[in-house]
Every structure is written in C-alpha cells, then in structure tokens.
Image (spheres, coloured by chain):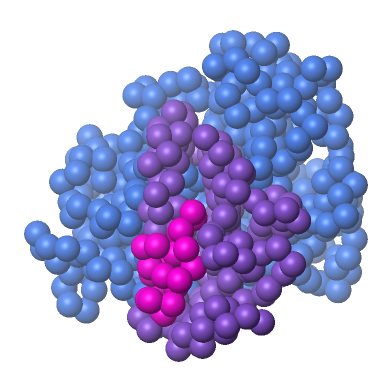
Chain colours: A purple, B blue
Amino acid sequence: MNRHLQRILILLAFGLSAGWALPAQAALGGGTDSVVADAAALHGASAVTALQTYDIFEIAAGDGARIREYATHAGVVFAVAWSGPVMPDLHILLGDNFAAYAGALATVDRPGLRRSLRLETAGLVVETGGHMRAYRGRAYLANRLPAGAAVSDLR
Amino acid sequence: MRLVCLSCLIVTATLLGACLGGGKAPAGAGSASAPVVNTTAVTVDTGPAAATGAINHAYVSVRVCAPGSASSCTTIDHVLLDTGSWGLRVIRSVLAAGSVTLPAETDAQGQTIEECATFGSGQTWGPVATADVTIAGETAAKVPVQIMDDTGTGAAPPGTCGASGTLVNQVTDWQANGVLGIGVFAQDCGTACVAATTPLAQYYGCATGGACAAENVALPAQVTNPATLFTADNNGIIVSVPALQNANGDASVQGELIFGLGTQADNGLPPTALTLLGADANGDFATTFNGASSSLPALIDSGTDSYLFDDPGIPVCTSAAWVGFYCPPVAPLSLTAVNTSAAATTASVVGSGDTVTFAVGDPDTFVATATAFSELAGGGGSTSFTWGMPFFYGRKIYIGFDGQASGSFKGPFYAY
C-alpha cells in the first residue's frame, strides 16, 4: 500500500462519526485528503480497499450507517454510495454537484412519493431509494469513472 | 396490552372452514361481547379536494382526537394507506380545519420534539404530538403522531432537513391529507434513535424560538404505527382490494383494510395456498427479478404507485404525463420475479420461493381519467424491488407486525 493511503488510514483510525458529519470536501468530485483533515472530529470504523484502478474508502457507523467513497489513485472521488437508517446530507456528499442535483430534483413531480428516483444531469447521476429505517443510494460522475470501474460496482 | 386474544385464536383454529370462506363464527363462539368492528373502507380515487389527479393512491379515513377528549376530534378523509412506512402523519392545516389541537411531545429539557422523516426524495418536518386514533372500531390512546407543518408556524427545520431534497409537508405534495404508515414495524426509527452516541438526524429537540438539535428519543415516544397500539386486533393487518375491471385503468376501486390476523372470524390466515415472506431487520424480504443472479431487498408497499425496479431493457416513457415510468413498445410485457423470505417466521416457510408473473402495460394507452392502474411500472436505477399498488389489485395482502404472533407465525412478515 502506498504512503498516501497509509497516512489516510492512520488518521481514519482515530475515528469516524456515526452522525454522517462528513467534512465538506470529502465529497463527490473532491479530494480524499480532506477526510484526513477532519478525521479527529469523527468516531466509527473505517476501511480502505485498494483495487487495481481505484480505492474504496468505507466508513461504517455503529447504527448500521455506511458510506463508501470511490476515489481514483490520484485521490479524486468519482462516486459515493450510502446506506443507513437516515438519509445522509447530500449537501455534504455531493459537494459542488449539489446545485445540479437540486435543479434536476426541482423538475420532479411530488418528490416525496418517488421512493426510488434516478436523476441524471450533465454527467452527474444520483439514485436515491430505500425506505424508512433503510435508506440507500449512490451518486457518481459518469464521465469520471476510471478504467476498470463499472457502475454495477458502485453500491 | 399486546397479547393476542387466546380464546379468539382457539376459536379460529377450530373454525378454519369459516375463516377460509370469510364466514362468521356461529353464535355463541368466541368472546361473549360483540367483536369490535375491525374493517374500514379503502378507496382508490382521484384524491382529496385540495389535490386531485392521484394515481394508485389508496385512501382511508382516520379519526383523530386530542388525548382523552371526545369532543376535540376530527375525521380526516383521504389519508394515504402506506404499508411501506410506520406512523401516522397529518398535515397541520388539515387538523386546524377540524379545530383539533394536539399536545406536542416535549423532552426532558422541556423542548418540543420535532421530526425530520425522509420519504422518497422529500422530507417531512414538524412536531411529534400525541393523539387518540380511531379507525373503524379500533382505538389507540396517546399515539405519537407527526404533524407535518405546512403552515411554517412551528420551529424552523434545521438546515439538514429538506437539504437533501425538498420538504414535503403540503397536501399537494402527498395528494393526501395525511399518511397512515401501518407496515411491519411499530416505531418509525426504532432502536437506532434511542441511544446513539451521535443522535441521528431524525428526531430533534427544539427550544422555544430557538434552534433545533438532533436528539435520542425513547421507543414509546417515537412516532408509532397506530395499529400496533390498538387494544385488540393489533398483531397485523389485511389489505383486500378487488381486481380492476380494466387493466388500462378504473375510475375508482373500493376495498377493505382489516385489523388483526387470526383474532376475529374475518381475519384468519388461510391454511393453504399462502405465500408467507419473513422480513429482515430493515422490513424487507428478497426478490429475484427476471432470473438475476442475486436478489434485491423488497417489500409490498401500498404507498408506491407502481412496480418499482430497474430494468434497462424497457424504454422509459417520453410523454410528460408519464415521466419516470416504463413504456414497453409491445404491451403488456410479461415479467417474472421470485419472492423469498429474508428471515424465518417458522421453520416451515424458510427457503421456499414464490414466482410472481406480472404485466407492464403502456401508460400512453391508459385511460386518461382513470385513477387505478394494475400494469404500471417504473424505477430505473433502483437497487431494490418494490411491489407497489398494482400488486394489491385482486389480492389479499397480509402484514404481520414485528414481534407479534399470528397463529404459529411471528412477524415481521408479508403474505399473500
């Protein structure tokens, strides 16, 4: 494992929160270094899986919540996936992409009744689903998937 | 309070024939007093006066009273029947129109308890209050309910509520005056909201005129499925809706919501030809769609208007009226899926799978003024399988509540 990953792992080991309180820049399209910067403020279990063309950072909280961030080896997050008892704050997870998501969502009729929703705009894909006690979803930048990463891997 | 009426069960077991046919127990059988009326009408129609045009929305009427009051009451029509959520939620202005004020719950610091609950891509926001809830002849006292604050007169939602989507507190958001969540669970959040180190972003304590902070809430104070708190007939429900006369759309449909499983002559579980699917800790069973190599989490959800599943092979509709639904070029398209239990309810039902064949029609050929459609499907990108309202037409759907016994079975389960 390279030193970049080692550094992230050591600081993640100080804890990751149960409260979905992710740092502002550990977001889709952002860098993974920001996870390091805010790791001290969080509690939970973490793991990193290094695959051939990308890494998966997994944050698992005691209440069953789980976030996965898929990043290129250069450290850019191209996908996020979540599951847990509450919906995470997509302002944080989508970062700069939130405005595009909100714009696409505004065109949906009666969003509260759309228990499974897929929005796609300018390469950003956001899929939300699940139900009370078990929400799930993912968001990815369709044009930024590294070679070897399939959409079906992002879950 | 939660014990199933044992004498009723014994009577039910010895009168299986009567139960199968839905007939009444002979005079003198069962308990001495007349059984509580445990059925109420379910209507699929265009929706409440303030928000018509609904499709595949099943509605019931719910009577809500201030706790202990016989006069401060209102009967709310067009409450969405939702087997995919848990808890009663009522829109504030609807309560106000009925001149009913419900006392808000407060926490140990005297702050009002409010809730942000996610539905689809929207979130409801408003105080948790207590009410006496009556449906048919069944009553539950001091039920924690959510008041969806469409008037904005209560505490402002925290930035995280509505931040990931939009607030859905209006009658027009729901095409309903409220939502009756009577699925498998009792509390809407459960143990995850009781003692979390960092409280979940669901329940909040709101200081008067001040900010709201996420906090833990004990189970009895969480918004609760009222049917689990009825004094009797509280171990499950049956939703019985007739088949449509026209797959391309009926103007309206009338069915029944029946409370209790095996507690009265009208609610026995059939002894044969029953598919019974145990649900896991999330309230899901498993559906393997179209011969896939793995299954998807699934539930039977009257609050979803369609079969909801991902199938990239079916084109999506391009007409404005049917955005988000599938429009197969050759219709109806016949599809199959296999349902299996995700948890044991008894040893005899683990592992067996039931194959369901269902049809997906072309919405562009549907009757424009109809409200009920049995061949409506959508859900591209979904990572689960939802048996929505189309699955209810022509079936009796049985739901066994978490931890409650129904004869030899134990909830949570779905059955049909």
The image quarter containing residue B392 is: top right
Query: In the depicted view, which residue is nearer to us: B219 or B75?
Result: B219
Magenta segment, prevailing SS (helix, strand or loop): loop
Query: In the depicted view, which residue is nearer to us: A5 or B148?
Result: A5
Query: In the depicted view, which residue is nearer to us: A30 or B211?
Result: A30
- In the picture, measured across the screen, residue B150 lies left or right of residue A18, that is left
For residue B314, say whether it is visible. yes
* Count of numbered badges drawn on the protein: 0
Residue A27 among those drawn in magenta:
yes
For residue B10, say whether it is visible. no
Residue at x 40% of width, y 34% of height: A103
Residue B305 among those drawn in magenta:
no
- The picture places residue B256, in percent across and down from the top left corner, at 61, 38
Residue at x 72% of width, y 41% of height: B310
The image quarter containing residue B8 is: bottom right
- The picture places residue B261, in percent across and down from the top left corner, at 67, 58
Image height of B249 relative to B234, above or below: above
Residue at x 22% of width, y 79% of height: B108
Residue at x 83% of width, y 51% of height: B288
The image quarter containing residue B112 is: bottom left
- In the picture, measured across the screen, residue A131 lies left or right of residue A34, that is right
Judged from this view, the residue extending furthest toward the left is B209
- The picture places residue B407, in percent across and down from the top left corner, at 74, 67
- The picture places residue A35, in percent across and down from the top left corner, at 44, 73
Image height of B11 relative to B399, above or below: below
Residue range of the region highlighted in magenta in the rendering:
A19-39
